[in-house]
Amino acid sequence: MNGEQAAFGALLRDMRMSASLTIEGLAEASGVSVRGIGDLERGRRAAPQRRTVAALADGLGLGDAQRERLLTAARAGRSPAYSPVGVRALPRGIDDFVGRERELERLAEFARRTAARHGGASGSGSGTGEGSAGVPLVVAVSGAPGTGKTTLALHAVREFADLFPDGQLVVDLRGMDDVPPQPAELMLGVLRALQVADRDLARTGPGGHPGLYRQLLADRRYLLVLDNARDEAQVRPLLPGSGACMVVVTSRRMLTGLESVHRLPLGELGVRESAEFLTAMVGTERAVADPDALSDVARRCGHLPLALRVAGNWLATRTGWTVGRLADRLALEERRLDALAAGDVRVAAAFDLSYRQLTPVAARLFRRLALVPGPDTGAASAAQLTGQQVFDAEDTLEELVEAGLLGADQDRYRLHDLLRLYARTRLEAEESVQDTALARAALHRWLLDTATIAGRWFEPDHGAPPEGWQGVVDLSSADRAREWLQAEGANWLGALRAAATAGDHATVVEVAEALHWFSDQWIFWGHWPEVFDTAVRSAQALGDAVVEATQLNYHAWALLLCEGRPGDSLVRSAEALQVAERAGDLTQRAWAHSYTSWAHTLLGDYPQALDASREAARLFEAVGDLHGTLQGKAGYGIILLRAGRTEEALASDLDTLAFLDETGDRMEPHIAAMGRLNLHAGIGLAYSVMERWEESVAHLQTAIDLSVAARNTAMLSRCLIRLGESLLSAGRPEEAREAFVRCVSLGLDADPQRVAEARERLAALNAG
């Protein structure tokens, strides 16, 4: 803002008040917008053209003398030594800005910091020493196509204009053009926007333009927006070296090579922000009429601001449409990108611009990432899609991250939902069906092979990968295997589904068998019932009765423990028993009785549970199955405890613990550790029933330590809730609170029922 603009704004405000008009009244009388009049009065925009002044004069009812006075002030405001008007005017479409509170607050903090450092700089001189010598603050705003980088920057220009009284410059670097402008051309555009005379530009010559550019920006307090940057090489020469400026650079690229900049990455909007965005565009009445449909629209737009704007524009111009109708239109994935187009604004077109700038290798990997079954992937999985070495694949993934087409979180890479659909369209358009099938098959085969090797770390008679195994991921320990299985869970599950659909039943059964004991380590993943039910059908297709009985038992376990469905589990264990008897397999008969006993226990039928438990123990002993015997003994103690026979339960658990101490070195370590954990938890619970609180706490703390060592979050949550209750009864409420807080904080792998109980206990403690 310069003095002449301030004079015009003050004069306009005085004339409006003399006419006893509000801003809204003058807007109605003149046809000039409320925002436009407000910005003029505050000096936040250039003085208007003659036709706008004439409209304002008519609205004010000015006489000839007053009209001429207003025109004169407007002309003066349009002819400053340096113009505060940006290289381009602020575009429309930012008045409905929603969300981004955190990002705006960071920008506001930067703006305030800049203004505080250079508060002595004047609007007409070279400024104070601090203002001239200081280093401008630079913020790099980066994000995928359509995340609203430009909108955020332009909103910031409006919000913080008063902190930069010499003007706000917005320079479109046109970084997505096939041949974007060079820094020298952009610099010349800025100089001309600042009203540097052509004769001065000619006198200094192109070689002198950078010095003149730096001098002008060092002397003034500007907010400079370098929008839509191609890369570091385009931006670097445009960054002032000193002065009172704040610079905001927006780019789809991360601009990693820029030094000494504050970084502000943008992702999709939150659920609440997306709903507010759409509501602002379609109106409250339509939004509240069907909030579920509004949520569906936002979700199918991937909460991407550009997609939300397109969807909102579509509804705003089709007032006869319900929100549900658009939600249904977006439901078809294969048509979603086509549906996200309004006039000449297409979401896919925004993606095209970035895709065209990729190297051929990166473009190929980007397309094939659409074949990943889950929401994210690692470098080793991505390498299977292109046949690259893992390090080369990681470099290519990072190129996609740098280009703003791929998100990264530590060593995981994720395509936005709409970018995944776009990648699929490019894959279908640019690669043959055969090449696509080969890439998919290579990925699926590797995922299932690796899942089998990783899962066998927890299986009896297996353990570490076989000697000579040449894997591209580190499975050198059980912990590494667990990490891989959990990180790639959605992907190997997708590959397992594909194998079942393709009729590769032997592979399905092999993978399920390899993961059986690992499933104890990740109980509440949510997909074990599907894994083992799929394996049951594959075993039936193979016609192998022993394998069928085995997988039926695994499915009975999953229904029982993972989903809490003992009635359905009884049906499955009965089927397993029938098939095992037909096959003459004593081991699977024993396991069927074991799961039957467990289900009856949860249903409260303790006599039936004890009978089945005794039969399981007899059969396990007959076949010499130590792991089954351990499970049976531990289960017997649980039945006694639930049946109210506490002292017998305690004695049984102590006897089983002694059995484990004697035979544990002959068991698979993870199975033995899990058994020991369960026994200490059971003993701790028995002592709590007997109101022997200190002994209860001691055993439950041991169970907690074992859960932590095993990284078994499900069991940890169960032990923490029991420990908290024992501590409460022992008169140690603060320690109990710590246990409940710890339980609540465990995350998605915890037992949800125990987490809910911990929240209730905390609420009760807080209520006194």
Image: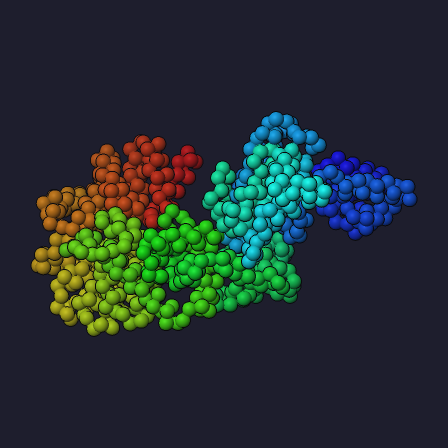
Nearer the observer, 531 or 350: 350
In the image, is 750 to the left or to the right of 414? Answer: left
The C terminus lies in quadrant? top left
Q: Which residue lies most toward the right here?
A: 64
In the image, is 499 to the left or to the right of 167? Answer: left
Nearer the observer, 544 or 197: 197
Residue 66: which quarter of the image?
Answer: top right
Nearer the observer, 113 or 732: 113
Residue 363, percent from left and from top: 44, 60
Would residue 84 be visible to someone looking at this image? no
Residue 711, percent from left and from top: 27, 45
In the image, is 469 to the left or to the right of 761? Answer: left
| Residue at (49% x, 37% y) in the render | 260
Would residue 128 be visible to someone looking at this image? yes
The N terminus lies in quadrant? top right
Count of numbered tags: 0
In the image, is 493 to the left or to the right of 350? Answer: left
Residue 592, percent from left and from top: 19, 61
Residue 420: which quarter of the image?
Answer: bottom left
What colour scheme has been applied to the protein in the rendered image?
rainbow
Residue 664, percent from left and from top: 13, 47
| Residue at (58% x, 50% y) in the render | 182
| Residue at (38% x, 52% y) in the render | 395
Where 632 sits versus 84, above or below? below
| Residue at (68% x, 36% y) in the render | 166
